[in-house]
Amino acid sequence: MKNYRIALLFVVAVSFVGITQAVESTSIKAIVGGTVVDLDGNASIHNAVVVIEGERITAIGSAKDISVPDDARVIDATGSWLIPGLMNMHVHLGLVLPGKMEAELANETEGELVLRMAASAREILQAGVTSIRSPGNSWPPRAPGHEDLALTKAIAKGQAIGPRIFSSGEAIVITGGHGSKEGQTYSDGPFELMKATRKEISAGADWVKIMISGGIATEGGSIVGALMTPEEITAVIDVAHRFGAKVAAHSGSSAATNIAVDAGIDSIEHGYSLDRQVLRKMQKHGTWLVPTIVVTQPATQPFFEKIGSPDWYLKRRNSVGKEHWKALEMAIEEGVNIALGTDQLPSELNDGTTATAREAQYYVAAGMTPLQALRAATIEAARMLGADDSIGSLEAGKFADIVAVDQDPTKDIRALRNILFVMKGGEVYRDFQSK
Ligand SMILES: [Zn+2]
């Protein structure tokens, strides 16, 4: 099975080689003429020079101070604004939602799944998203799984094209919980959950994903109930942290979140109905919230119609929309750490743009400044991952993950709707000419 998987990824890689080679003529590049946005709220650098050697930025500053190396390939970014590559922290590459989509993909083989995921990974990068976190490879979880870990390796080796992937492997499901199938048993009790946690880490996951409350995409099961016991949640977090892995919890519930925050959870996903008290606790503990607000808001209705979502799903989605919005507004007011995530494919068309750009727009509508929303999509996400020493901002020494947009995103976050240029690790994946 393993060889078959590698063979498939090779086919994917071969078809993309032409694109990579076409843009790769010298290892030194200089992006000139653009305006570099300052994520700390200081003045932008106009007429900037960004020098890139190999995968990393080696110098960045005003053209007055930084000279362009003689042998550099010069990329003219005049008239555009340069920001770090966008980061989307809640992406299931193998997502299957109930309805028409589920019916069409009912007999999808592992090979077909890998190719679908590889195609999505490429689109995600084209959409300006240079890093993603995968809190569960496929949804609903399926065996044998871990296709995203294979894809991560293939991307790192240059065999496939896509963003950097930080993965939790397969989400850990409890019997009767979110993601479970009726009548089937899963991991229950601290010891089984410890084993399941170690299994994912051993497969290569840097995160572990648990479902501490019910959710929208599984019919039945209370969204606001606390389905895992404190002993179970603590066991997972303890084991993961011993291995240096972080833990993300799917939660729509204040009660479940309260337990998880006490146990030292790293991130809460969705937070459909969090109350002010638990948000204050999250702020105090530095717990991250990944809102995925697009999923429950009106702009995404046409998407759900397109994929033929059944009535029970739409009802469940609509029932949490208002509360979810209120929770996001309160989280922003309380200064909770927020990293952008969509639970839709980052490049999914949404309201005339991508789900990623639309999510950021919603953050501003819910009370963030445009700069805060841009940070949630870049440096804050990198901080949540513990990867802010190498990605998340444009600085000498960091990976050259750079995106250009046509207006100042700190003035109007809608700038993210129009991605002009994408570089990841010093390679150009979308050039100014190729609109
Ligand atoms: Zn999800």
Image (tube, rainbow, N blue to C red):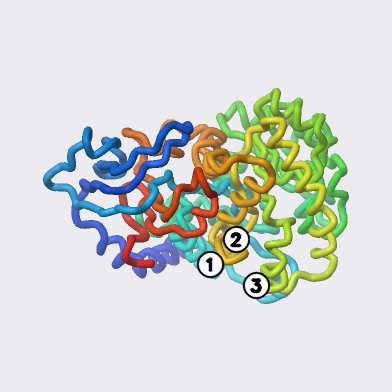
According to the picture, the residue beneath numbered tag 3 turns out to be: 105
| In the image, residue 229 above or below residue 218 | above
Q: Name which of mark 2 and mark 1 comes first in the sequence.
A: 2
- Kind of element beneath mark 1: helix
What amino acid does circle 1 point to?
A: Arg
Q: CA distance from mark 2 to mark 3?
A: 11 Å
Q: Name which of mark 2 and mark 3 comes first in the sequence.
A: 2
- Looking at the image, can residue 181 be seen? no
| In the image, residue 258 above or below residue 367 | above
Query: In the image, is the residue at mark 1 within 8 Å of ligand 1 by its beta carbon?
Result: no
Contact (Cβ within 8 Å) of mark 3 with mark 1: no
Disc 2 crowd rating (10 Å Cα; few below 14, some 14-19, many 20+) is: many
Q: Position of residue 326 (x, y in %)?
A: 78, 44
Disc 3 crowd rating (10 Å Cα; few below 14, some 14-19, many 20+) is: few
According to the picture, the residue beneath numbered tag 2 turns out to be: 94
Q: Position of residue 199 (x, y in %)?
A: 62, 42
According to the picture, the residue beneath numbered tag 1 turns out to be: 116
Q: CA distance from mark 3 to mark 1?
A: 11 Å
Q: Position of residue 105 (x, y in %)?
A: 65, 72
Q: Quadrant of the C terminus?
A: bottom left
What amino acid does circle 3 point to?
A: Leu
What amino acid does circle 2 point to?
A: Gly
- Looking at the image, can residue 432 be seen? yes
Q: Nearer the viewer, residue 366 or 57?
A: 366
Disc 1 crowd rating (10 Å Cα; few below 14, some 14-19, many 20+) is: some
Q: Position of residue 115 (x, y in %)?
A: 50, 67
